[in-house]
């Protein structure tokens, strides 16, 4: 394993050399998407320059190259998550992953009167697919409340998970807005005691902590490649093989079939059954490289580094009158969501942009959570492995300047 050195990491990410509004760029919107290291960019470029061909179909050498790269990537990813290749499905991202799970598994296993637990801090991607499916089958959604510090109401979960009607719980491992790290291992253990299906949205956890799918014991886990230094348009669903084998496909078309006739069609085994059509081969190859990239480091080192930056930012911003952090639970990722009394988050973000600093404002695709927080938007600075102490200091300095001018 490589010793974590932020300067070395920075040199792997070419975009970090660019300026934002003519100033050295401070990129603090990593919860929305991450930047890409050379190894990922080069692999995608190399694929299109040297190996581009459709997979699964060709008998010629070029097609074999593409096929080998594509399969190698699935192997790298499945090994990283300690899961078999059969249980590793390529999708477009966490959104498509959650839709696949809700539509393929949910529709078949939920019936009228059943209940699905989600939480108040879910991203819309883990709310809307369940609403669509529940409406279709006549099931109901129960929402686990958030406590004032931004943690989940664990007592509520314990009080509801055992209920006969509850069939499934789908929750995020880490809140994209609050940074809260949910006790998913504990919740999975409890849910499994009662035989419930557990779906984990890992979109925000994969960039910050290692997941061993087999050890974790959930039924499905999904994430997006672009948040973990990989390309956009590619993500993964990990699912238990037995469940995948029993599930109907989510989409039909080429590549996912065994035999097709007008009398009926039989499907290929997982993962192909869930990968209809020409896949995002370059994306998959890029994601494999991204996973190889983070595998070089200890996730503990990355997390310690990110937390140091978070603390610097938080301590500095806390000196501002009217600063309020949303999500203050101890166990949280390096995500700093905040509002400042008297200043709209959008105005703040525009001011920071002019200083070269990229943060996100808005509802972060968590409108129900915003309602709970009693705000329409927050400003969010989210840290990644390539951020520096100077980035945090510049953020604090710029926000203080904004307050002195905008107030
Ligand atoms: N879940 C969470 C917790 C997220 O943060 C996001 C992205 N913001 C998603 C799901 C959806 O990911 P994508 O848009 O990449 O499909």
Image (cartoon, grey):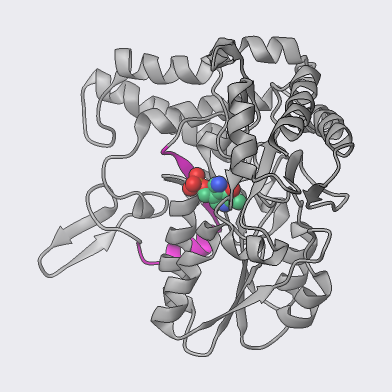
Q: Quadrant of the C terminus?
A: top right
Q: Quadrant of residue 273?
A: bottom left
Query: Residue 245 colored magenta?
Result: yes
Horizontal side of 24 relative to 91 (left or right) equals: right
Q: Report x, y in % for residue 76.
A: 55, 32
Question: Which residues lie in the magenta part?
Answer: 233-249
Q: Report x, y in % for residue 137.
A: 42, 82
Decide: is 110 above or below 220: below
Q: Residue at x 84, y 59 (%)?
A: 149
Horizontal side of 383 relative to 307 (left or right) equals: left
- The residue closer to the viewer here, 224 or 380, is 380
Decide: is 332 above or below 103: above
Q: Quadrant of residue 304?
A: top right
- The residue closer to the viewer here, 26 or 233, is 26
Query: Residue 73 colored magenta?
Result: no
Tally the marks: 0
Q: Report x, y in % for residue 92.
A: 41, 44
Question: Would residue 358 be seen by someone viewing this image from the given angle?
Answer: no
Q: Residue at x 44, y 62 (%)?
A: 245
Q: Quadrant of the N terminus?
A: top right
- List the single residue furthest toward the left: 262
Q: Report x, y in % for residue 98.
A: 49, 58
- The residue closer to the viewer here, 155 or 327, is 327
Question: Would residue 39 be seen by someone viewing this image from the given angle?
Answer: yes
Q: Residue at x 56, y 27 (%)?
A: 290
Horizontal side of 376 relative to 327 (left or right) equals: left
């Amino acid at each position: 394993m490589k010793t974590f050195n932020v300067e070395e990491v920075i040199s792997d990410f070419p975009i970090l050399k660019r300026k934002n509004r003519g100033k050295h760029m401070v990129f603090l919107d990593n919860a929305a998407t991450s930047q890409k290291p050379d190894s990922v960019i080069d692999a995608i470029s190399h694929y299109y320059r040297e190996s581009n061909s459709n997979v699964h179909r060709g008998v010629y050498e070029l097609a074999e190259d593409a096929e080998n790269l594509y399969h190698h990537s699935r192997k790298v990813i499945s090994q990283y998550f300690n899961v078999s290749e059969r249980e590793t499905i390529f999708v477009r991202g966490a959104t498509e992953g959650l839709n696949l799970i809700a539509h393929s598994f949910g529709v078949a296993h939920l019936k009228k009167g059943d209940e699905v637990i989600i939480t108040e801090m879910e991203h819309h991607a883990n709310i809307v697919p369940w609403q669509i499916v529940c409406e279709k089958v006549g099931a109901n959604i129960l929402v686990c409340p958030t406590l004032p510090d931004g943690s989940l109401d664990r007592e509520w979960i314990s009080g509801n998970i055992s209920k006969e009607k509850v069939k499934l719980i789908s929750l995020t491992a880490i809140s994209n807005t609050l940074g809260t790290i949910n006790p998913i291992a504990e919740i999975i253990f409890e849910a499994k005691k009662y035989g419930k299906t557990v779906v984990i949205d890992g979109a925000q956890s994969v960039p910050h902590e290692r997941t061993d799918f087999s050890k974790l014991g959930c039924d499905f886990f999904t994430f997006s490649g672009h948040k973990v230094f990989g390309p956009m348009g590619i993500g993964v669903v990990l699912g238990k093989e037995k469940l995948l084998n029993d599930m109907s496909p989510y989409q039909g078309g080429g590549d996912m079939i065994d035999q097709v006739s007008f009398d009926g069609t039989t499907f290929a085994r997982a993962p192909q059954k869930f990968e209809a059509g020409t896949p995002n081969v370059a994306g998959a190859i890029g994601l494999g490289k991204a996973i190889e990239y983070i595998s070089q480091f200890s996730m503990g080192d990355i997390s310690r580094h990110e937390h140091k930056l978070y603390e610097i930012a938080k301590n500095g911003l806390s000196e501002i009158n009217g600063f309020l952090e949303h999500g203050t639970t101890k166990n949280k990722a390096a995500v700093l969501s905040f509002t400042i009394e008297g200043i709209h988050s959008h105005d703040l973000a525009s001011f920071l942009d002019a200083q070269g600093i990229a943060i996100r404002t808005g509802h972060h695709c968590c409108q129900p959570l915003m309602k709970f927080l009693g705000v329409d938007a927050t400003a969010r600075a989210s840290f990644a492995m390539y951020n520096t102490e100077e980035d945090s200091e510049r953020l604090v300095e710029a926000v203080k300047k904004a307050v002195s001018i905008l107030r």
